[in-house]
Amino acid sequence: MEKTQIGLLGFGTVGQGVLQILQSREDLHIAKVLVRHLENYQGVKAPLTDNADEILSDPDIDVVVEVMGGLHPAFDFITRALEQRKSVVTANKAVVARYGPELLALAREVRQSFLFEASVGGGIPVLDALANHLSTVPIHSVEGVVNGTTNFILDQMDQGMSFAQALERAQRLGFAEQDPSADIDGWDSARKLTILTGLAFHSWVAAEDGVVEGISRVDASHIHRMREMGLGLRLVARAERHPDSIGFVVAPAAYPLSHRYLALHGSQNAIGFLSEAGATWLEGPGAGGVATATSIVSDIQRIRRSVPDREPITLLPSFVDSVDDTYVVFMHDPERPLPEVPHILRSGPGFMVVPHKLAELEGMVQYRYRAK
Ligand code: HSE
């Protein structure tokens, strides 16, 4: 059988992870790798180019893997690859969150596969679980801890570091995104939640239409006071289906120390789905070169194994409904006073904890959720 020829756009941590995994493969071959500056890769044993046309216009390349990150030119390259009748695999959550429906439609039109397992939860097969396994039952809610940088920063603050020191350390260790606000202000989690929501509820909710609050207003004293109350903090992304709207929120949330979220450290992620089948949880490495590359290679394998002339593989969303009972912490913001909230479970200087049941939080709904 002929090898599947792959063009790799981007050669950072994830791109290098893909190359590492594919080195031992007989069936999958990296034909070309796009890098920005060839001079930075002297001595690297890979077929490098700095000209995207050499990949996008090469008729021998079957699958384009985009791991450059950023919206542009990544979106333009993906579009061109599909138009050239190549299947595309990407890890780019910014592109998928913003342009997912458009790219899925284009892929269907040109009868190519468009897969993006690596864009949410790194090495955890979360989209496959959602779009295939759980597509048979209505899903009520999706939630998770999907950002490792904030796990790391919150843990460091728990150990006594200030927010600024912890962020600086996360950046030094290579955890944080290039622009750390994507992590700490919640946008990285929000993009992942948009993708999860798109597949779970068939509705691509833009982060701007939900509520996104990061951890930059959390300080070490909040964490210490919460710990005294037996609570710990994680940045949680959550979407729920309601009859006429979708609740979409990314916010620092407090949980008892025994909760699964508090056992996640560094790049570990956990994602849960509440469906007619019950609660399904997936946990694992949410970032890292080789971990994320396993999701990419698994997508490439699915494309290779797909039957010619059958429908190409795209991720199809499933059904819906509502519920739940976790806790959300709302940090006091002097600039934006919180509305009167019934059912405050606990509060202290700088924070309060309220149940997350929307039905009980009418005053909060306007503030936290904007109906679609
Ligand atoms: N910056 C992301 C994180 C990388 O901290 O989890 C993985 O998407």
Image: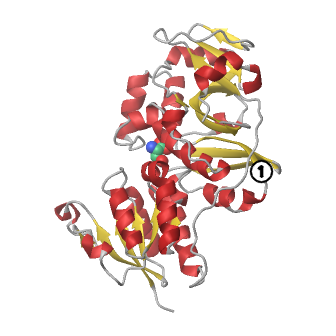
Residue 372 drawn at (x, y percent) = 60, 36
As drawn, 187 above or below 370: below
At a point 47% along the width and 60% down the height, the residue shown is 103
Residue 16 in view in this figure: no
In the picture, measured across the screen, residue 75 lies left or right of residue 239, that is left
178 lies above or below 59 = above
Q: Dot 1: what SS?
A: loop
> Farthest residue toward the right?
277
Based on the displayed image, in which of its 4 quarters is residue 164 positioned? top left
Q: Is residue 229 above or below residue 372?
A: above
Furthest residue toward left: 39
311 or 114, nearer to the observer: 311
Q: Residue at x 76, y 38 (%)?
A: 322
**Residue 188 at x, y = what percent?**
47, 41
Q: Position of residue 327 (x, y in %)?
A: 70, 25
**Left or right: residue 125 compared with residue 259:** left
Q: What's the residue type where badge 1 is placed?
A: Pro
Estimate how packed mark 1 is, as few (under 14), some (14 to 19) or many (20 or more) residues with alpha carbons within 10 Å. Answer: some
Residue furthest to the bottom: 1
The residue singled out by tag 1 in the image is 138
From what the image shows, is residue 342 above or below residue 355? above
Let me know if residue 296 appears in the view.
Answer: yes
